[in-house]
Structures are given as C-alpha cells and as structure tokens.
C-alpha cells in the first residue's frame, strides 16, 4: 500500500518544528475506580510519540476512551489515567487539554494529550466542520490507531482529508505491511484458521477467504456447522442449522479450486458445558445425541498441525475449542504450537486469539499480532478500510 510514512518524514527532517497531531488508540480497560487494568495499547503508541518528540515536533495526541456521549463530558470519560501512564512510559509529564478543538498551544519538543475525542459533537458522523477544525491544528496528521482504521470518523478520516500532510504512524504502517504480506502477496500455501461460536458472524470472512486460501481450517461452533453440512451428527452442540447451505457453498468453492476445508475426524465431547465436565475423545462419526463437542480431537489436531508446518503463510482468527477449560484446550494448544514452530509468516488477530497466544507464551513466535479486532476482521472480509483508502489517496496527491 502506497502511503506516506511518518518515519520517512522524521528521517528527512520534514517533521522538525512542525505541529504533529497523532490519532492513537489508547482505549484501555479500566476497573470501577478508573485504574488501568491492561496497558498494551498505551505501550504500543509510545514509539510514534517518541519519534515525533525526537524530531523536535510540537506533539498533540488524542484517542477515544469508552463510549462517551458526544457533547456531554463526564469525569469517567477522561483520558487523565492514560496521561499518567503515558507520562510514566515517556519519562515526562503529559498534560491533558480539554476543549481543544478551537486551538491548542504546544511548544516544539513538548507533548500534550487532547481529551477524549469522542466527546466532540460530530466525531462519530465525521462532521466536516469538526474535521476541518482538527486539521487546522496541525501541519502533519499521523494515523497510528489500527483499532479504529475501519471507522470513518472526524479524528480518523475527516482530519486526514484536510490536514496539510496525512501519513501512517509506525503501528498502522506495520499492520499495513503485515496484511499486505499475508493477504495481497502471500507465500503459498496460504492457510487460514477461522474459528468462533457462529458461522453468521464470520460468513463474509469465510466466503472471502474461500476465494483466496489454499486451506481453510474452521473451529469452534463454526466447525460444528460444517460437520453438519458434511452429514455428521453433532448432538446438542452449538451450530447454525439454517446456514448449512452457506457452509456447503464454502466447501464447494474451496473444492473447485483444489483446496479444502478439513472436517474433524475426531472430537472431544462432554455432557455439560463446564470446566469440570468429564471429557471423552470419540470419532466424529460417533457423537451421541446428548453430546456437546467442545474441542477437536487429538487425531484431527495432529493432522492440522502437520499441514500448518508446511504452510507458507498462516492467518489465524479464533481458538478451535473451549481452550479456557483445561480438558478442552488440547486442540487450540496444538494449533498454537504448530503455528509457533512453522517457518511460515503468521498473522493473528481477535481477542480470543490473543488470549490463546498469551496463554501458551508464543508471542515472539508469531510473525505479526494485530492490535485491531474489528479492523482485522474487516480486512479478512476483503474490505478496504477507510484509513487505508484516505491515506493512499492523500499519498497520491
């Protein structure tokens, strides 16, 4: 993707002394007392801010936090806790500026955090007047929030239309590069793992991938629906019987290209959905009417792992079983370790996927871990993200 990169602007001296407006993703979880419980997104935003400061820019950073009501600021909507943590990471105080749309004073070499951008009226609907006011605050707009790249809002899209220069920050650029490598010019074979509770939420993704991948591994409730489509019984397992034709169409689309959707040959079942429910491994043809399928079986896991080790590129979205329960984690653990051991370029995204990666300690063995849940899924659906579209257009002049 041809976009202007902030790193290039800094390296060439074009950011020196300039007003730089960074749209970061600092939307972190907090407890009832307002304490940040997980700061990955804040830490991920630091390189871009440091890059701007080292270039001698006057730096403004903003983000959304939670779901505030536009035009009605409440103390719990404030970015103050984020500013405190950001200050600790940067080793300097980070002032929070409220009511900033009509003007901000910040000196070169200094950084300020502009209060929750979703409080501004017109933010979510990408109001043009608001976007133009934001653009007037800066010489360079830097989009570094992949988690919002699928939304066309004033602070993510509108400002990029009207700012003198609009570019991609290092975090967004890394996402763009990883996506291009995995989906636009993949090393073959390209294997995608799509798992989750429902086919309906991932149907467009499955259809899009079916036209491109060499192997499509399905897991979780999605796999149950595909098992039904293949004529297997799944007992009282979670599935969507009304989408059998859609599942069959995906299988046929893959088959027409000489590709495959592997159907489990064995499964791990229980009579109840509980962490302490006794687990039984059985052939996929032997599922009883009162069984719940909660994981793929060891034979299936082993076969899929062998195929993953031969892959050139792996796209991973979703665990293949109820990995939170020890008795039903073997499938996800086996898949996770196979991806980690593979020489393939791997890109992984989605909340449950990240939880599995953390559980099995394989962060350093995944080629790229995507920070954006919804944005990552929309890329897999084959959609062009608004952020990518506007930054590409601005780069073309």
Image (tube, rainbow, N blue to C red):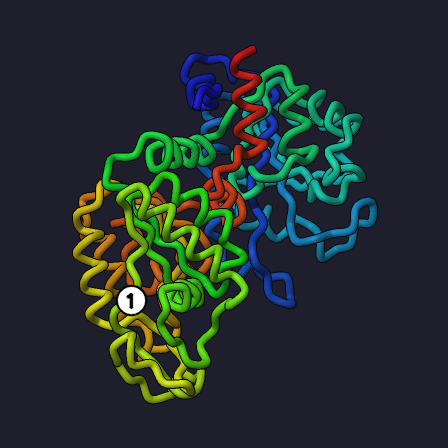
The residue under label 1 is: 264
Measuring from the top left, give residue 240's x and y in whole percent: 51, 67
The residue at 59%/46% (across/down) is: 83
Asked if residue 180 lies left or right of residue 307, the reply is: right
At 40% from the left edge and 76% from the top edge, which residue is drawn?
Answer: 234
Q: Nearer the viewer, residue 18 or 23?
A: 23
Is 285 situated left or right of 236 in this image? left
User: Of all residues shown, which one is farthest toward the top?
Assistant: 397
The N terminus - image quarter: top left
Q: Let me know if residue 91 appears in the view.
A: no
Residue 271, horizontal then vertical, whole percent: 40, 88
Residue 303: quarter of image: bottom left
Q: Residue at point 80% right, 39% down?
A: 121
Tell me the crowding category of disc 1: few under 14, some 14 to 19, or many 20 or more residues within 10 angstroms, Cα based: many
Most foreground residue, 46 or 90: 46
The outermost residue toward the right is 71
Left or right: 111 with respect to 134?
left
User: How many numbered circles are shown?
Assistant: 1
């Amino acid at each position: 993707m041809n976009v202007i990169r902030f790193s290039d602007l800094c390296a060439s001296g074009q950011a020196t002394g300039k007003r730089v407006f960074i749209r970061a993703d600092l939307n972190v979880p907090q407890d009832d007392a307002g304490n940040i419980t997980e700061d990955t997104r804040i830490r991920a935003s630091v390189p871009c801010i440091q890059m701007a400061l080292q270039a001698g820019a006057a730096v403004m950073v903003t983000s959304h936090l939670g779901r505030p009501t536009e035009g009605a600021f409440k103390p719990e909507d404030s970015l103050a806790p984020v500013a405190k943590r950001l200050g600790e990471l940067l080793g300097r105080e980070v002032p929070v500026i409220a009511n900033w749309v009509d003007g901000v004073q910040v000196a070169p070499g200094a950084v300020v955090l502009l209060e929750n951008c979703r409080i501004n009226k017109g933010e979510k609907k990408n109001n043009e007047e608001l976007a133009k006011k934001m653009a007037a605050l800066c010489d360079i707009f830097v989009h570094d929030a992949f988690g919002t790249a699928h939304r066309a809002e004033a602070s993510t899209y509108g400002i990029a239309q009207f700012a003198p220069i609009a570019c991609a920050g290092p975090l967004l650029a890394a996402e763009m590069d990883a996506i291009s490598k995995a989906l636009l010019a993949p090393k073959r074979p390209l294997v995608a793992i799509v798992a989750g509770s429902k086919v309906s939420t991932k149907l467009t993704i499955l259809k899009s991938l079916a036209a491109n991948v060499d192997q499509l591994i399905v897991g979780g409730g999605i796999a149950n629906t595909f098992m039904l489509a293949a004529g297997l019984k799944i007992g009282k397992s979670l599935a969507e019987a009304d989408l059998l034709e859609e599942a069959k169409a995906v299988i046929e689309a893959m088959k027409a290209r000489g590709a495959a959707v592997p159907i489990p040959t064995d499964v791990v079942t229980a009579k109840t959905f509980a962490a302490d429910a006794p687990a039984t491994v059985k052939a996929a043809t032997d599922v009883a009417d009162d069984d719940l399928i909660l994981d793929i079986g060891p034979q299936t896991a082993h076969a899929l792992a062998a195929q993953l080790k031969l892959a050139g590129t792996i796209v991973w979205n979703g665990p293949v079983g109820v990995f939170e329960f020890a008795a039903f984690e073997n499938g996800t653990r086996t898949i996770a370790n196979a991806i980690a051991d593979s020489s393939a370029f791997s890109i992984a995204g989605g909340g449950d996927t990240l939880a599995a990666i953390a559980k099995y300690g394989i962060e350093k063995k995944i080629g790229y871990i995507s920070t954006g849940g919804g944005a990552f899924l929309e890329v897999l659906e084959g959609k062009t993200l608004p952020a990518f579209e506007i930054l590409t257009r601005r780069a073309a002049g």
